[in-house]
Amino acid sequence: MRPPRKPIGLAIIGCGTIGRIRAEFARDYPGIGWLGLCDANAEVGQKLADDAKADFFTSDFNELLKRPEVTAAIIATDENAHVGPLLAACERKLGLFIEKPLATDARESAKVLKAIQDAGLDAVMGYTNRFRRRFQAVKGKLVRGEIGDVTSVVTRAFMNRMVPIATIRKTNQRHNLTPMVVSGTHALDMSMYLMEGKTPVSVYARSVDKALSMWGTKDATFGIFTMDDGTIFSMNISWALPHVWPGAVYGLQVGIVGTEGVIDIEDTHRDLVMATEKPIGAGYTSRDYRPEFERHVDFLTSYPPGDVNDGQLWGPMRDETNSWFVRIQTGLKTPHASAADGHRNLLLTMAMDLSAKRGTEIKLPLELDEFYK
């Protein structure tokens, strides 16, 4: 007879767009026995606490994480503010769900990963694309070797410029808030997930910054990785498309060629297009950002978390979050990225940026100090 499942005592640090989504899923999940929230902005956090019927709210993450009810935590702060709450959660030995990245600094990311590993924690990363059905279908085909040995992979991500502007305007610490580190990491993670077992040994990249230089970031980064078995992997992202580009956030294409077949993945969402004379809203907003451009065409389902119907969000982020709740309660194996995957993704995206800056091929892996020369 299986032992009864203990209710989860969940702490959510960060009550912005993604923290709100995860909190609403937690409110609806029957295995959550206690819910506590934290945000530096007390007005925003208290509003979510009221909406999600949370049991506790504070502006001090240490106060929340020290609560005896807490058994697991979601870290959903801005990208530059993950390290403090992560280290505090490691001290409590909590189950962890971490919005990417572990940190925006390579040394801090390594420090956090070591703390997670030393504490023996089950920590996963928020790479929501892994929970799109099409990618799970492809993963199964590759694991079973149905196209033979993979020899080349081409990945292209397109985004309009709403996300970089919304992300970067919140902080002056912008040196690592690049297309690859913030958003290309999703496409890179998916590609590495599908190429599981292959290790990059070099990368050569180029960047351009004509449209978004005023915001302190690049427009696009294109690169080519060589893997340890000779596989070549082209990884390209542009997040500077105009505000009115119909993809609300992310459009991804992946081509995988093997010795005995090919898989071509179209995740651009152009199979479901809406055009209307009425303004359709921004497509992407945050607490501090509302685009000034009117949009009338949309690639439906291109907002990564999912889509709203009947007052609820349906899609990959619900599946991702609820799967983590089940994982915490039962130990179920899930497709989540690990903390080690997240650290690897950060170093690879930073290596692309370093190659583009130097204009030379970079041999991998790099010593962490190399990123600071």
Image (cartoon, rainbow, N blue to C red):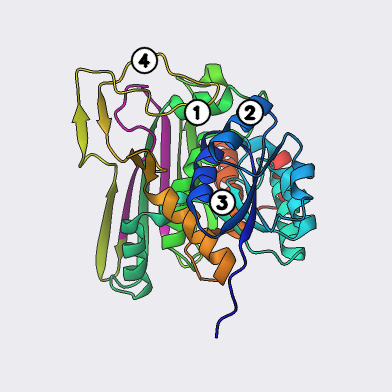
Q: In this view, does 127 lie above or below 142?
A: above
**Measured Cα–Cα span from mark 4 to mark 2:** 25 Å
Q: Which residue is drawn at 29% across and 23% down?
A: 280
Residue, disc 2: 174
Report the disc number at residue 293: 4
Amino acid marked by disc 4: Phe
**Measured Cα–Cα span from mark 2 to mark 3:** 18 Å
Mark in front: 4 vs 3: 4
User: Where is residue 130, by image quadrant?
Assistant: bottom left
**Measured Cα–Cα span from mark 3 to mark 1:** 19 Å
Q: In this view, does 160 lie above or below 352?
A: above
Graded by Cα atoms within 10 Å as few (under 14), some (14 to 19) or many (20 or more), the crowding at tag 1 reads many
338 vs 208, nearest the viewer: 338
Amino acid marked by disc 2: Arg
Residue 86 vs residue 289: left or right? Answer: right
- Give the structural element (helix, strand or loop) at label 1: helix
Residue, disc 3: 345
Magenta region, main secondary structure:
strand
| 31 in magenta | no
311 vs 100, nearest the viewer: 311
Residue, disc 1: 164
| 253 in magenta | yes
Quarter of the figure that contains the C terminus: top right
Locate residue 153, reporting x and y percent: 36, 56
